[in-house]
Structure formats: structure tokens, C-alpha cells
């Protein structure tokens, strides 16, 4: 059975503790708040640890965290602060994966955004997604609760794939059970973070997360970032 934990019910615990983030590489996949989760975890972990942020896909270059494109730059920045972003600038101005060796072990905690969702709250994964780094210790799938009770076509990245896995039509409203069904069919992650639960309480009620968690067999943590 899936288990549900919320920040309010575990006020003494940080989100990285609820998600059981261990030292090493953590891949963040899914939709509805991966980047926000990455920055939030970095803020918690960096109070005591060195944290490296990066991607195996394409993300916007952060404007509040210094960027290292070489190992020399990375070492220099880590000598001054606890959070650094590493990657390679693309021609489009986005950030892609680092090209220098050893980035996977350059910090005690390495947080990696491993796929894209085009800012939509739900998604299905293509065969080439997510791009999980070698030696990854943790894999967290993010789900945006704002996609629940909305027409599939309007809230899902790769809707054709999602429609097949959920066994629904383009305009079917996505229920928590349907979203859980898609995740269970895809697999490939250790835990789930349901983001945007402030939206849930207004639209569907607090019981929605419990319904979602019951449909999965791995831990589920819920909150709003």
C-alpha cells in the first residue's frame, strides 16, 4: 500500500527527510514542480552539506545560484558556498548536462532534473525518458495535483502516451486513481511527491491524496511548493 505523509503532520521533519533523500545522486522526474522541489531540497540540505544541482535534460539557467561549466570552476565555487549549479550552456541558452568527468561525486548531495514536462502538471514518459545518471541512489517522481479533475488533453505532457496508459479519452477528467495507474504502469522511481496540494483541498478535498497513495505500493509524500 502507498503511504501518505504531509509536512503539517511531520512538522519536525524536513522534506528531504520525508522523501528519504540519501547522500549521492538523486534524480527528479515527472511533472508539476521538479525544479521547485530541487531548489527546496537544496535549501534544506545546504545548511549542513555541499549540494550540486544539474540536469540530464534541459532547464533554465538559475539566476540565484552560480553556474560552473568546468571542474575547476566547480571546485572554486564550492570553496566559497554550499550550493552550486553545473552544466553546459546550449545554443538556445538552456542548461544541459555537464561535460566534465566526476560531477556525479563532486558533492555529498547531487540533485538532477532528469526529464521535462513543458510546465504541465502531469505527464507520460517517452521511451528515452527519464535520463537517470549512472550510480543514482534516489529517484523521486513529482506529480502536480493541479492536473487532477482536469481534462487530460489540457494538463498532460505527451497526451497520446498518457491516454493509452490511463485508458481514457482526450477530454476525460483525470482522477487521482488514473494518475496513480499511469505511474504504476511506468515505474522506475522510489518515491512520489504530490505537489500543489493547496489546489487539491480547494477542488477535491483532502482525501484525494489518500486515494492516490492507496493506488500505489511505494511511499507518497504530499505538500505545496
Image (cartoon, grey):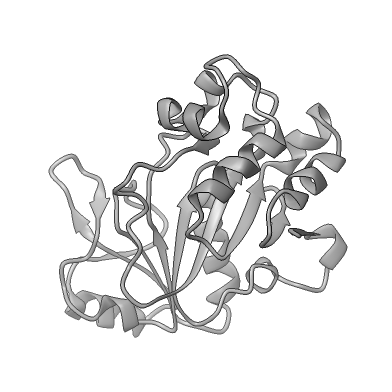
Quarter of the image for residue 108 reads: bottom left
Q: Residue most toward the top?
A: 171
Q: Quadrant of the N terminus?
A: bottom right
Residue at 54% in and 26% down: 155
Q: Is residue 20 visible?
A: yes
Query: In the image, is 47 to the left or to the right of 114?
Result: right
Residue drawn 12% across and 43% down? 91
Q: Based on the displayed image, in which of its 4 quarters is residue 65 positioned?
A: bottom left
Question: Relative to 216, is 138 on the left or the right?
Answer: left
Please name whichever residue, 164 or 203, is drawn nearer the observer in this view of the structure.
164
Q: Position of residue 168 (x, y in %)?
A: 57, 23
Which residue is at a point 16% across and 48% down the rendered structure image? 90
> In percent of the image, x 34 and y 46: which residue is there?
60
> Can residue 35 be seen here?
no
Q: Is residue 79 above or below residue 31?
A: below
- Compared to 147, does 43 lie above or below? below
Q: Nearer the viewer, residue 201 or 207?
A: 207
Frontmost residue, 42 versus 218: 218
Residue 209, percent from left and from top: 77, 45
Amino acid at each position: 500500500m502507498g503511504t501518505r505523509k504531509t509536512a503539517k503532520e511531520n512538522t519536525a521533519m524536513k522534506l528531504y527527510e520525508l522523501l528519504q533523500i540519501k547522500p549521492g545522486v538523486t534524480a527528479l522526474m515527472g511533472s508539476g514542480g521538479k525544479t521547485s522541489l530541487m531548489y527546496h531540497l537544496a535549501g534544506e540540505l545546504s545548511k549542513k552539506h555541499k549540494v550540486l544541482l544539474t540536469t540530464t535534460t534541459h532547464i533554465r539557467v538559475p539566476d540565484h545560484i552560480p553556474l560552473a561549466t568546468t571542474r575547476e570552476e566547480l571546485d572554486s565555487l564550492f570553496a566559497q558556498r554550499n550550493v552550486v549549479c553545473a552544466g553546459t550552456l546550449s545554443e538556445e541558452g538552456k542548461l544541459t548536462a555537464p561535460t566534465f568527468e566526476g560531477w556525479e561525486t563532486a558533492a555529498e548531495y547531487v540533485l538532477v532534473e532528469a526529464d521535462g514536462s513543458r510546465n504541465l502538471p502531469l505527464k507520460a514518459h517517452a521511451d528515452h525518458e527519464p535520463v537517470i545518471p549512472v550510480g543514482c541512489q534516489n529517484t523521486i517522481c513529482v506529480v502536480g495535483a493541479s492536473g487532477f479533475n482536469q481534462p487530460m488533453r489540457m494538463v498532460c505532457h505527451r497526451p497520446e502516451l498518457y491516454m493509452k496508459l490511463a485508458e481514457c479519452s482526450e477530454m476525460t477528467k483525470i482522477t487521482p486513481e488514473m494518475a496513480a495507474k499511469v505511474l504504476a504502469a511506468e515505474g522506475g522511481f522510489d518515491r512520489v511527491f504530490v505537489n500543489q496540494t493547496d489546489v487539491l483541498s480547494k477542488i477535491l478535498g483532502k482525501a484525494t491524496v489518500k486515494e492516490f497513495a492507496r493506488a500505489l505500493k511505494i511511499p507518497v509524500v504530499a505538500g505545496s511548493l
